[in-house]
Image (tube, rainbow, N blue to C red):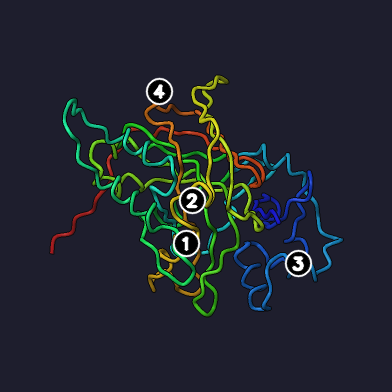
Amino acid sequence: MRLIQFYSPEKGRRVGYVDGKNVVDLTSVNAKWTRIYQLFLEARRSRNTISGYLADIRLRNADVVPYDRLLKAHPRDSSGWILPPLDHPDPAHCLISGTGLTHLGSMEKRAEMHAIAAEGAEVPKTDSQKIFEMGLKGGKPEPGVRGVQPEWFYKGSGAILRGHNDYLDIPEFTEDGGEEPEIVGCYVIDDDGIPCRLGFAIGNEWSDHRMERVNYLWLAPSKLRVCSVGPELVTDQMFTDVRGSCRIVREGKEIYNSGELLTGQDHMSHSLANLEDHHFKYPQFRISGDVHLHFFGTMKLSFPNRPSFRTGDRIEIRFNGMGEPLISYVHKLSLSQTPITVEEG
């Protein structure tokens, strides 16, 4: 099932599923379903999946919206627009995180970013190389065995989440942005504290690769940027062999094309089960009611194989079996200083 969230200026937030060229408006059937989050919890409490739960409900009289109209719309358009496919009513209870160095091509790209001139000298293995090789050896353990942990990073709360056709900011305190075409696992922690995977979505993780290149210890702050997810949450993706591409267009002209991108377990050094285990093994990530969006890594970045981003650049990411492509636009922010209030003790 291909689920979306969208907004109607006349009716407010809506939940729907893609049916051919249309979106079936589930909120027109039950006004309480303004988020996939709410629909999932209702289905879970009935001991059912979303698709199984909806199969028992009469949807014949549901409103229908042309999908093409929504896909072309931008946030705050008068005709309505697409929202991220999973969020929480309180953004503080939506945790966005991810793993890196998980793909068989990712080590090469990380090495390019951290390259140092050492002609004729034997270069010792970097920490990135070491952790990547650990994943190759122990990232796909047998069932019941805990494998090696991956690189992990915190990205932010739901406040940084952007949807289809929205803008990705380049803050004034940095020089550039960097797209990361990935698959995102979408989770809700149920009433019993059990992490439940609703499905997967396309994501643009959007990091600061120029900052990270200066010193890999700046990887943590380089991740503290907005990100985009969507347009769809796909519930029946197996995440084994997923193929896609990323292209960047400036003023109608393509300035970067990734070629074929490979993701899914067949092309990764870690299994999905191992990545999920090492994220949700921490009790603070199993708080009932919380939402988790977890990026699973990419095999290829455009940095440093393109000019610096400009406002208006268009980034398109597509993956087979993941519905319509995710489109984002770049917005460079002007210089400003963060206001700080100092109170004397």
Tell me the distance, in whole angstroms, between the alpha carbons under discs 4 and 1. 33 Å
> Marks 1 and 3: which is nearer the front?
3
Quadrant (top left/top right/bottom left/bottom right) for the N terminus:
bottom right
Tell me the distance, in whole angstroms, between the alpha carbons under discs 1 and 3. 25 Å
Residue labelled with disc 3: 54
Give whichever of discs 2 and 4 has the lower sequence position.
2
Residue labelled with disc 2: 161
2 and 4 marks in contact (CB < 8 Å) = no
Give whichever of discs 4 and 3 has the lower sequence position.
3
> Could you tell me residue 188's position as x and y percent?
54, 67
Figure quadrant of residue 151: bottom left
Please state which amino acid type lies under the numbered disc 4.
Answer: Pro
Please state which amino acid type lies under the numbered disc 3.
Answer: Leu
Return the residue nearer the eye: 30 or 99: 99
Give whichever of discs 1 and 3 has the lower sequence position.
3
Q: Is mark 1 on a helix, strand or loop?
A: strand
